[in-house]
Amino acid sequence: MTPFDLAQRLVGVKETQGAASNPMVLAMLQLDAGTAVTDDATPWCSAFVNYIAWLMRLPRSKSLAARSWLVVGRSVALADAEPGYDIVVLQRGSGRQPGPDVLQAPGHVGFFAGLEGDRVLVLGGNQGDAVSVARFPAGTVLGVRRLSPA
């Protein structure tokens, strides 16, 4: 089983609307942030990838910052990315965004699920407040990282 296979099993996990929070999303957030996070409205894309990596005993960023994944694993060209052990880090937000050398900036992270024309498919958490597969412009990819078993 690969991290991608495990992540696929969680498709459909979503935030709870209102004052309550989904306990599974909270567990993902609290794995690295501790009890300081008490709400599933906290951005959790990196928490999802960290959770899967933790379950699979793979290297992880141990951070809720999406761009923290730019220094985990081995760099892979987007053209060589494969579903399985590869994650994709993307820019987030409108306007001019800093490049991959700036780790303290908005971003998004998830598992590489494929290419569709000029779009990259990403299996990730906090995509529409749920674990899902979403399409992003390939031009927003900051990096692809391969998580290798120790």
Image (tube, rainbow, N blue to C red):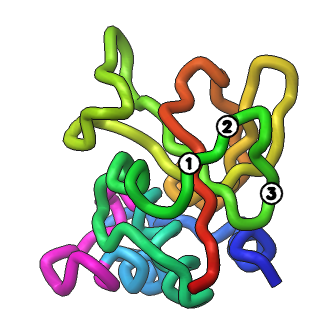
Tell me what residue is drawn at x 50 percent, y 54 percent: 126
**Magenta span of residues:** 30-44
Q: Within the image, what quadrant is residue 101 found in?
A: top left
Q: Kindly identify which residue carries mark 3.
A: 83
The amino acid on which the numbered mark 2 sits, given as a three-letter code, is: Ala
The amino acid on which the numbered mark 3 sits, given as a three-letter code, is: Pro
SS at mark 3?
loop
Distance from Cα at disc 2 to Cα at disc 1: 7 Å
Q: Within the image, what quadrant is residue 96 found in?
A: top left
Residue 43 image point, x, y percent: 35, 55
Q: Kindly identify which residue carries mark 2.
A: 77
Distance from Cα at disc 3 to Cα at disc 1: 15 Å
Residue 90 lies left or right of residue 61; in this view the side is: right
The quadrant the N terminus occupies is: bottom right
Q: Is 6 inside the magenta-drawn segment?
A: no
Tell me what residue is drawn at x 47 percent, y 76 percent: 59
SS at mark 2?
loop
Q: Earlier in the sequence, mark 3 or mark 1?
A: 1
Residue 136 lies left or right of residue 36; in this view the side is: right
Q: Is 43 inside the magenta-drawn segment?
A: yes
Furthest residue in direction top, as rendered: 95
Q: Are marks 3 and 1 in contact (CB under 8 Å)?
A: no
Q: Are marks 2 and 3 in contact (CB under 8 Å)?
A: no
Q: Kindly identify which residue carries mark 1.
A: 75
Callout 2 crowding tier (Cα within 10 Å): few <14, some 14–19, many ≥20: few
Callout 1 crowding tier (Cα within 10 Å): few <14, some 14–19, many ≥20: some
The amino acid on which the numbered mark 1 sits, given as a three-letter code, is: Ser
SS at mark 1?
strand
Number of callouts: 3
Q: Are marks 2 and 1 in contact (CB under 8 Å)?
A: yes
Residue 86 image point, x, y percent: 67, 57
